[in-house]
Amino acid sequence: MVGANNINLINKILNCERLLIVQDIDGVCIPLVENPLKREINGDYVKAASKLGNSFSVLTCGEHEGRRGVNRIVERSLQSKRIPRENGLYLPGLAACGIEYQDRFGNIELLGLDEREELFLKGVPVKMRSLLKEELLTFMPDIEEKEIERQVEIAICDTRFSPAINLNNLFKFFEQDITKKIRLQEIMQTVMDKIIIISKNAGLKRSFYLHISPNLGSKNGREIIKFATKQDIGSTDIQLIINGALKEAGLLVLINKYIFSKTGKSPLGMNFNVREAPKSIEGLIELCKKNIGNDEMPTLIGVGDTITSTKDINTKSWLRGGSDRGFLTLIQRLGEEYQKNNQIIFVDSSSGEVDRPSVNKSGFEGITDSADDLKFNLVMSNGPDEYKEWFIKFSQARTGKHTPKDSLL
């Protein structure tokens, strides 16, 4: 599956005049952990990202700001709240799957979110806590109420624009019991389905959707949950996301902003956001071809870890999903359309605290298959640590030849 080693990949793209790395965060540069509040990021990696200037952006379903935001992790890594803001050391790009845009200095811009939706989102975590506690008290009758409340606090991610349930810590109660792990996943889905109903009753019928991570693709506009097996923990999170906030649409926002940084012009419009973007890969490609010339389109490197492929035992067809699949597929397709040397990097995130398919243990089973259109140019089989080392090396080699004018380091 690997089409290039580290040296070849660097040589292919090191000297591209226009280059944009678009990278997921959790499982890529941050190891997956059971408690998201305990995430850690390497300070050298953060500095390497800053040196790349406008050639680097993140694209994540997590968030930049708030107590659970990646900005807090960066500040802990650098042991300062002042240094990252003054020296441009925050990770720039799109969060909340495309709503929360941030530059390297931590300046936030909300894209495509209206006041009614923002107001509704503020009250969602409270509703989620109440609903989840009610379900867990019935499901786990032998656990004291105080402990249930503690677990609810860990499980509910009270992010500002994409509140979620994370089951990683609750799974520890049922280490060897697959049936109960599946029941937890069903409870998670039940709670989040109720939140959708509440939003519709509040007059926001078309405002939100549920993003399941990892998932098995979509059916009838709804993402398919991946239930636990002995080999794979399956879906661990469900987020309430703004409709239209898909990573592949977010990729176009980032390309639009990158071109503006180079030319002073926004080919898709100054206020272009994910809610204005087409919903299909084909539609997104068509929009690019109509508005972005070959000389404007940068060479793209896409980096992700959440990609799934499972065979349906009934239909014998492949169920392919994962929150990174869409934007990585679009990067691959844009490379073909624009004849660019675009690259796809897959980071194996199974070495963290969350059970995931491992290329070291079972090859690409559960991740991809021989008939999959999405192909990896480079596989980081040893996870975020290996990617961090590669990324720092790449940044040093790239900036040794091309020092970004806006880099302050």
Image (cartoon, grey):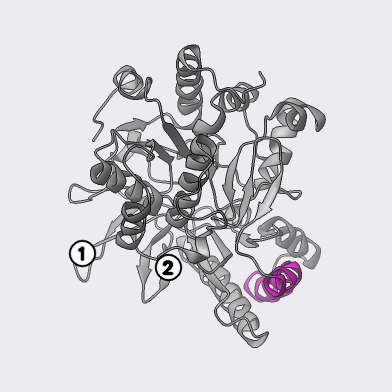
Quadrant where the image shows the N terminus: top left
- What distance separates the C-alpha of mark 2 from that of mark 1? 17 Å
Residue sitting nearer the eye, 98 or 80: 98
Quadrant where the image shows the C terminus: top right
Which element is circle 1 on? loop
Residue 267 is covered by the magenta coloring: no
Q: Report the predominant secondary structure element of the magenta stretch.
A: helix
- The x and y percentages for residue 238 are 55, 63
- The x and y percentages for residue 193 are 56, 77
- The x and y percentages for residue 248 are 42, 54
Residue at the extreme front of the image, as rendered: 264
Q: Amino acid at mark 1?
A: Ser
Viewer-nearest of discs 2 and 1? 2
Residue 133 is covered by the magenta coloring: yes
Q: Amino acid at mark 2?
A: Glu
276 relative to 16 in the view: left or right: right
Q: Is residue 254 above or below residue 217?
A: above
Residue sitting nearer the eye, 245 or 130: 245
* Residue in view at x 50 percent, y 20 percent: 395
* Residue in view at x 47 percent, y 41 percent: 259
Within the image, what quadrant is residue 14 found in? top left
Q: Which residue is mark 1?
A: 317
Q: Is residue 29 above or below residue 237?
A: above
Q: Which residue is mark 2?
A: 223
Within the image, what quadrant is residue 126 found in? bottom right
Which residues are drawn in magenta? 115-141
